[in-house]
Amino acid sequence: MIKVEKNIAGRPLKIESGQIARQAGGSVLISYGETSILATVCCSSEPREGVDFLPLQVEYREKHYAGGKIPGGFFKREAKPTDAEVLTSRLTDRPIRPLIPKGYYHEIQLMLTTMSYDHENTPDVMAAIGASAALLLSPVPFDGPIASVKIGLIDGEYVLNPTAEQMQSSDLDLMVTGKKDKICMIEGGSNFVPEKTILEALEVALEGINDIVDLQMEFSEHFDNSYEMTDSKVLSDEIENKLNEEYSSKIDELFDIGTKQERDDKYNEIVKEASQPFEEDEVLLPEVKAHMKLMFKNAVRKTVLDRKVRVDGRGPEDIREITIVPSLLPRVHGSVLFTRGETQAIATTTLGSSRDEQIIDSMGEDSKKSFMLHYNFPPYSVGEVGRIGFTNRREVGHGHLAERSLKPILPSNEEFPYTVRIVSEITESNGSSSMASVCGGSLALMCAGVPIKEHVAGIAMGLITDGENYAVLSDILGTEDFYGDMDFKVAGTKDGISAIQLDLKVPGLSMDVLSNALEQANKGRLHILDEMNKAVDKPYPLSPFAPQIESFPIDKEKIGALIGPGGKNIKALQEKADCVINIDDDGLVSVSASDKEKLDNAISMIKAVVQDPEVGTVFDGKVTKILDFGAFVEFAPGREGLVHISQIAWERVNKVDDVLSVGDEVKIKLFEIDKQGRLNFSIKLLTEKPEK
């Protein structure tokens, strides 16, 4: 067994192999503190037939036993991956994929399993390190190693790999993955920190990344991980030259076409014409199509670098036209149609009570979410026929990024005690639909009456580089994303960044390029914010279709009285007032009702239970007990008072049960609280006194 160890941020990081999963192509057990992940990699012996992409599968899973828990639910076992597991799988896949050579079509499966969790060191940071170390031991050609670290900002100080508890008070949550001295991927959120802070955090991250990369290099020296790449070129130089001569000028003409659909149609015509002589050749036909695709890619890149002109004719910093239609849908609580060029999203906001919160069952502590953003990407948004099924990884990832972007602007639960759900339906896509979801979501929040103070806007930045020269592109198209070298998404307000995501197709970027991209993204974001403020500059009144909710604190000592034995009192209150009542451990009561009248009635009834009523207050009561000297009347669930026989009527009452029966509903007025604190009520004081 081989084992290496290094101190990273005050805790031991260990990588070991040779004891577990020895039949895998590569396997390591990586531990940080007492959190441990088993990382394994297997690859097929032959390339997968009929593919022109890397068939890489990354699966991250958390086992509840790792945190000393039994899963919730009926089946009591881990089922389909949670959103958190999907996101960690993506965080691992994204930096690894560009580091495996183009043309390598062997199936690769990376499995990452958290087997021990110490509730301090989060496993998402360790997943990419484990995957990288396992790949170094495998026959897969991998231009690594890579390493991931997390950076927090606590009391103005940058903290490398903060614990879960430290992250609760951090203004920055930044996951950074890189090679030696280069950034490969960024994912994170922040409390509107400026661009300068992000750059400083990346410098701190690189130091930690370099240490972990060095540890992996020391580890890999114990193994023979050599590999061979075969030349897969099929087309002859003669055919390639002929295609270049005949179709280069036609491909250049595509840049004069303004819309995506027309451009795609014309490109398909060119490819069809070029492929016609090879239709009977099953070997050469796909290679010709691939070469035409490469010609278009090279033309896109050359035009940007040489002429500073993009596919749709824009300059590098130009933003496409933006149109906004507020309150598009009449019955939803808040909605907006946001269109930027050929990217379009319908964003809706729905408001609910605390009972609508999402319960998160994980290997850590169970928790609840009162804000959710869900992103849907139907095939028609790109003019295609596609399979409709479960939410895919892309939808989960884009939704999470947009949710993270908007979360910092939401009011506190005390200020706005609603559960908030945003849904972004992508109806057109050519360029970043996740950033359109951020803009649309911010506008939809205001349209629903959520009291946010300012908008959040998002922009996607691209990059074209030949190794020496580069151009940063604002508000990229799908073509520029596909054929470019970077997808860099930045969201925030005018004051700072709330979320950031970087994906690369090159091995890594220098800090200078990242700095320029952040500066250019800031200019674009401010332009988009101006357009958003022109359309909706302040929150609308609360939708009449939204539930009415109000929260207020009560004495903790009164919680038991409000709930009652076995929940009897609170159930009775909810049924009588037609409302929903929730109480947290601190005594904060949240009441939800369908209209204001029901809400006010429910609050009055609750206060009657938890507060001492004032003399002169009138209640609707129910007779619960008949005695010789009077009747006890329940004026609130679990609370009773006495109506003395002399207070039943102005005329003389000989027997209480001549007038009242158990179960009678009567109006009563509190006229006295005696020295012993007993509540004395009257029925007769609510009627006119007879003259005699």
Image (tube, grey):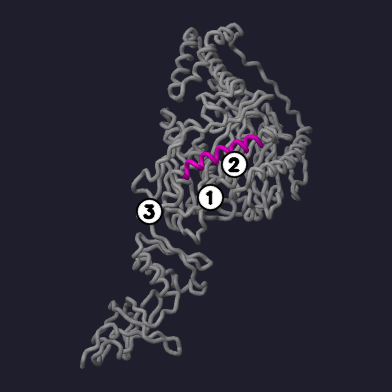
575 vs 655, left or right, is: right
Q: CA distance from mark 2 to mark 3?
A: 32 Å
Q: Hey, what amino acid is under mark 1?
A: Lys
Q: Please, is residue 558 above or below residue 647 in the view?
A: above
Indicate which disc residue 500 carries.
2
Q: Is residue 518 magenta?
A: yes
Task: For label 2, count other residues whose C-alpha is less than 10 Å away and answer few (under 14), some (14-19) or many (20+).
Answer: many
Q: Please, is residue 248 above or below residue 77 in the view?
A: above
Mark 3 — residue? 543
Q: CA distance from mark 1 to mark 2?
A: 13 Å
Q: Hey, what amino acid is under mark 3?
A: Ser
Indicate which disc residue 407 carries.
1
Q: Which residues are magenta?
A: 515-533
Q: Hey, what amino acid is under mark 2?
A: Ile
Tags 1 and 2 touching, CB below 8 Å: no
Task: For label 1, count other residues whose C-alpha is less than 10 Å away and answer few (under 14), some (14-19) or many (20+).
Answer: some
Q: Residue 682: percent from the left, percent from the top? A: 32, 85
Q: Please, is residue 43 above or below residue 639 in the view?
A: above
For numbered disc 1, what is the local secondary structure? helix
Name the residue nearer the viewer: 418 or 139: 418
Q: Please, is residue 554 above or below residue 411 in the view?
A: below
Q: Main secondary structure of the magenta part?
A: helix
Task: For label 3, count other residues whose C-alpha is less than 10 Å away and answer few (under 14), some (14-19) or many (20+).
Answer: some
Q: Is residue 211 magenta?
A: no
Name the residue nearer the viewer: 159 or 678: 159
